[in-house]
Image (cartoon, grey):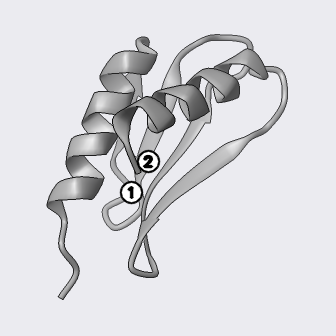
Amino acid sequence: MKKNHISDLLSTICQYNNVRITQTFTQEGNDLISVRCVPDTTTLELTFLETGEIALYNSVEEAAAFIDKHINRIKVI
């Protein structure tokens, strides 16, 4: 998935921040990251599904860049 598509997706999630929308990024059948917008904010909450670690981003572009790097560097063997 290209970074600009990730940005568009995250922007849409933030536009509907009063609704529960969660996007899961998967690679080769493995769920890697789930993303949601914190209700009534524009803060994106990224959850790393393998570890349960949570990261918060106030910028769609920064979150998209991070997701892009993360999902494109992991190669499942």
Question: Is 27 above or below relative to 47?
Answer: below
Tell me the amino acid under the disc marked 1: Gly
- Residue lying at 36% horizontally and 35% vertically, measured from the top left: 3
Residue 7 image offset from top left, x and y in percent: 47, 27
* Mark 1 or mark 2: whose residue is earlier in sequence: 2
Quarter of image, res 9: top right
- What label sits on residue 47 in the rendered view? 2
Confirm whether residue 55 shows in the render: no
**In front of the other: label 1 or label 2?**
2
Could you say whether the residue bearing mark 2 is in a helix, strand or loop?
strand
Is there a contact, CB below 8 Å, between mark 1 and mark 2? yes
What residue lies at 38% left-to-right and 57% top-to-bottom? 52
Residue type (three-letter) at the residue carrying disc 2:
Thr
Q: Residues within 10 Å of mark 2 (few under 14, many from 20)?
A: some
Percent across and percent down for residue 67 are 33, 42
- For disc 1, the marked residue is 52
Place residue 19 in its image quadrant. Answer: top right
Is residue 16 found left or right of 23 in the rendered image? right
